Image (cartoon, rainbow, N blue to C red):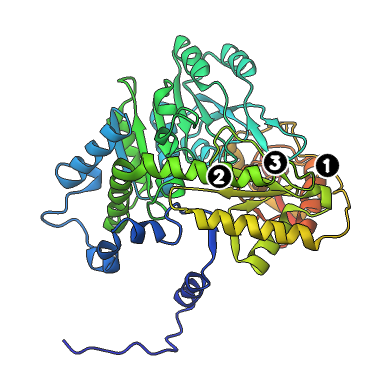
Amino acid sequence: MKQYKLKDNYNNHILEKLEKLRDDDLVSFHVPGHKIGRIFKELGYKSILENIYTLDTTEIDGTDNLHNAKEIIKDSQERAARIFNSDKTIYLVNGTTCGIEAAIMAVCNPNSKIIVNRDCHQSVINACILGDIEPIYIASKVCKKTNIITGVDVEETKKIIDNNLDAKAIVLTYPTYYGKTFDLKSICDYAHSKNMLVIIDEAHGAHLQLSDKLPKSAINQGADIIIQSTHKTLPAFTQSSMMHIKGNSVDENKIKSILRFLESSSPSYILLSSLELAVDIYDKYGTSLMENLLIYIEKFKSKFKNNENIMIDNNMDKTKIFISMKKLGITGYELDSILREEYKIQVELSNYYGVLLICTIGNNEEDFITLEESLEDLLMKIDKKKLLKDTSYPEDIPQKVLNPRDAFYSDKITVKLEDSIGKISGEYIIPYPPGISLISPGEIITQEIITYIQQGVKSGMIVSGVKDVNLEYIDIIDINKNYF
């Protein structure tokens, strides 16, 4: 076959940008967990991945079928189940999003109820829209110093269970995006005593079983269905996740039937291969790599232990590091930009008070030395102290007038954002990341939320869910065309 030379100006905008990012040699404290592929090179998997494009195929003789796994995929999933202490593991190629949606719709019939932590990922609400399910919210606790959501209160959760005994299941986020945890086992035991299934969004906890110094995984705390983003904290490719099933209370066939609706009928073998690579690395090297990682993190934190100008939050999941310079008047959005532009360090996300770093077994000691030296240099450059003005995260759950499905399918009109106060939202308002909805379709828009969003956007916050990217307008329910 004739060989064609790729022209320098091949005008592929996505490829050009990705290649530039790769060649910028950024220090990665963001997902995916393989850290720009470094872990594959260091552990000897480079030769497998150099020509991975040649492994891109479809369901032919010898490749099996994800939606009816009988051979190689079945064997690989069974190995993953053994390694992760699961009774059944299902590979996902549409991220944890499709796993959450499938789990919810498999256990909840239309017009049923499900109990949900308010700081849930938007995929939970999407599942309620798709499945015509009524969400019952648990209020989230918020740290006043950082505006970080820390999870649910156990006793409050039990009260909501008692007041909604007709709910089919409870869905909780554990750990939170920021690495916060709570007494999950107590909630699982209580929910089971009331004949409720427990679904856990463990998108940010696929690594937890690698060390006793980390919180216990939901897999070992009584949850029935656990969905993990293997690509976030372990070295799989983006969009590669796993669903783990424990016990025999879950209808596995119903989950699989719904996954056929939500995932492609031609699942990517490259993504499936990356899941198997992640399992292999986890099994062979994970424990020792995690031990080293936790040592690097503790050494880094100790350098700033007595520095009053920088705050490093202590998370239960030590692999999540939150850094704040609010005592110097620097917002998290500004710190994010400074670290990237001046020191070539990319963090996972920023909020008003600080930045979140996601550390994985793909990071090495040099990453933390670079981070330490960069922060020390930055602190030396700042000669003026100016305490950052406080802002409050909206904690009150908005009044729900319509369930998410009814709101989604209702007629809507577009109004200016400031004119939407007191009206029923027809859209989401979601600071992203982490993708937690402040307002969902069907809820009353409040002054508190609009003020918080407008102030946040001025500081650098990114908001998704609203079709107007400039955040000047929002869709509300047209009460003249809908009869409730």
Task: Tell me which corner region of the image, top left, top right, bottom left or bottom right, holds residue 73.
Answer: top left
**Residue topped by disc 1:** 447
For image coordinates 69% across by 37% down, the residue present is 443
Q: Amino acid at mark 3?
A: Lys
Residue 305, label in figure: 3
Earlier along the polypeptide chain: callout 1 or callout 3?
3
Task: Tell me which corner region of the image, top left, top right, bottom left or bottom right, holds residue 183.
Answer: top right
Residue 470 is situated, as x and y percent measured from the top left of the image, at 72, 62
Residue 47 in the figure: left or right of residue 426: left
How far apart are labels 1 and 2 at the CA level?
Answer: 41 Å
Task: Tell me which corner region of the image, top left, top right, bottom left or bottom right, holds residue 345.
Answer: bottom right
Residue 127 is situated, as x and y percent measured from the top left of the image, at 49, 38
Residue 407 is situated, as x and y percent measured from the top left of the image, at 62, 40
Secondary structure found at label 1? helix
Earlier along the polypeptide chain: callout 3 or callout 2?
2
Instruction: Work out whether residue 469 can be spotted.
Output: no
Name the residue nearer the viewer: 464 or 474.
464
Residue 118 is situated, as x and y percent measured from the top left of the image, at 63, 32
**Residue topped by disc 2:** 297
Q: Quadrant of the C terminus?
A: top right
Residue lying furthest left: 61
Q: Amino acid at mark 2?
A: Ile
Pointer 2: residues within 10 angstroms few (<14), some, or many (20+)? some
For image coordinates 65% across by 59% down, the residue present is 373
